[in-house]
Image (cartoon, rainbow, N blue to C red):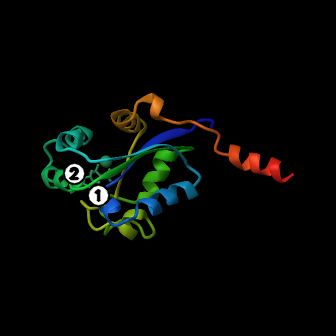
Amino acid sequence: MKNAEMTCLIIKPDGVGKGLAGKIIDRFETEGFQLMAMRMIRPTQSLMEGFYAEHKGKPFLPAFLEFVVSGPLVVCVWKGMDVIVRVRQIIGSTDSQKAAPGTLRRVWGTDQRRNLVHASDSGSSAQREIEYFFSPEELSDYQPNAWKQAEEIVLC
Ligand code: CDP
Ligand code: MG
């Protein structure tokens, strides 16, 4: 895919716990993004402290870390044109109550802490976050339309 970017999306414990992982993944597949990697993890405090290092010292961090390690996470990598900014638009702003109508956080999130998902906010954070969870070999690049074309050939 020409000029395609990658982004890191994490389904937080509230998203997994509410049984919404499939619906969240479906939203990004429907958008036409390509799933390149996915893993369910049981996060530790130190793993997530490192991931959210930019927020070190902020007053909300202790309570947020307690929430984000309270259950399993699903970590994914998505690829597509302008995927970083488009995924941020689809999830909505940080506070679920104030996020735009129709965004994932507004529809399924609870508040500014329990907001369903994380998504990279820039090219540099996407690179750092993808490398934080996945080695290069774990990112599977493939032709998204190969199966469709194969089926068309069989049907001809
Ligand atoms: O995730 P996003 O980039 O929208 O927000 P952030 O400012 O980078 O904050 C990271 C995460 O910390 C948020 O997604 C919230 O889950 C949490 N947070 C919080 O618990 N309380 C706040 N006042 C702000 C953020
Ligand atoms: Mg952020």
Q: Residue at x 14, y 55 (%)?
A: 63
* Mark 1 residue element: helix
Q: Which mark is residue 93?
A: none
Q: Quadrant of residue 38?
A: top left
Q: CA distance from mark 2 to mark 1?
A: 7 Å
Residue drawn at (63%, 35%) of the image: 2
Q: Position of residue 124 (x, y in %)?
A: 39, 34
Q: Is mark 1 within 8 Å of ligand 1?
A: no
Number of numbered callouts drawn = 2
Q: Earlier in the sequence, mark 2 or mark 1?
A: 1
Residue 93's place in the image compared with 144, above or below, is below
Apparent side of residue 48 relative to residue 129 in the rendered image (left or right): left
Per the image, the residue denoted by label 1 is 13
How many residues crowd mark 2 within 10 Å: few (<14), some (14–19), many (20+)? some
| Left or right placement of residue 6 versus residue 148 in this view | left
Q: CB under 8 Å between callouts 2 and 1? A: yes
Counting from the top left corner in percent of width and height, residue 9 is at: 40, 48
Q: Which residue is mark 2?
A: 69
Image-quadrant location for residue 19 = bottom left
Residue 23: image location, x then y, percent: 46, 63
Give the secondary structure at mark 2.
loop
Q: Badge 1: few (under 14), some or many (20 or more) residues near its Cα, within 10 Å?
A: many
Q: Is residue 61 above or below residue 136?
A: below
Q: Residue at x 15, y 47 (%)?
A: 58
Q: Amino acid at mark 2?
A: Val
Residue 100 horizontal/vertical position (percent): 41, 67
Closer to the camera in the image, 128 or 153? 153
Amino acid at the residue labelled 1: Pro
Residue sitting at x 69%, y 47%: 147
**Residue pushed farthest front?**
154
Quadrant into which the N terminus falls? top right
Farthest residue, direction top: 136
